[in-house]
Image (tube, rainbow, N blue to C red):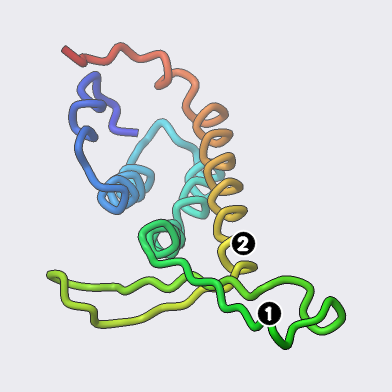
Amino acid sequence: LLDSRYAKLVAAGLSAGDLIDTCTVLLKVNKEINSDQRTEGLALLSGLKDLLNTRNNLVHGLIAIASDSDTRTAETAPEPVIETMALVSKRRRPELLLTMTKAEAEKTVKDLRERGDGILHWVVAALPAQLHRDQVTN
């Protein structure tokens, strides 16, 4: 997207959020990408930062299993309730407690996989010449 042999160096070390912002801007101005490809690429990047934030809460949060095994029966609750709690903090001060059910966690994983696959397919389809461009990495 950067149209430079130094693209890997420019992108190295950027956070996921910064990479998403950079790719979004580059998609809007890159002249090698047609309108349909631009629209599809922007759609794939849209909302990705929120999805990654949810993923980070899941991965870095606390996992708790709420069990009511004394009163639980196979008919009323076949499996324990699993929730992920993320203490979202700024400067190590807990400010917000978020919870996520097992179904929400599974949906996050599924959505990330689908979005990643979509981006990979888009890159291969929209940027074949750029994939073979020489890169300066030393």
Judge the density around disc 2: few (<14), some (14-19), many (≥20) Cα neighbours within 10 Å.
few
Task: Locate the N terminus by quadrant.
Answer: top left
First along the sequence among labels 2 and 1: 1
Seen from the viewer's position, the closer of residues 66 and 7 is: 66
How many angstroms separate mark 2 from mark 1 (CA)? Answer: 26 Å
Q: Is residue 68 above or below residue 13?
A: below
Relative to 96, is 98 on the left or the right? right
**Callout 1 secondary element:** loop
At 52% from the left edge and 43% from the top edge, which residue is drawn?
A: 116
Relative to 126, is 61 on the left or the right? left
Looking at numbered disc 1 in the image, what kind of residue is underneath it? Answer: Ser
The quarter holding residue 82 reads bottom right
Relative to 119, is 98 on the left or the right? left
**View extreme (bottom): residue:** 71
At 47% from the left edge and 27% from the top edge, which residue is drawn?
A: 127
Residue 80 place in picture, x, y as percent:
66, 73
Task: Locate the C terminus by quadrant.
Answer: top left
> Which mark, residue 107?
2
> Which mark, residue 69?
1
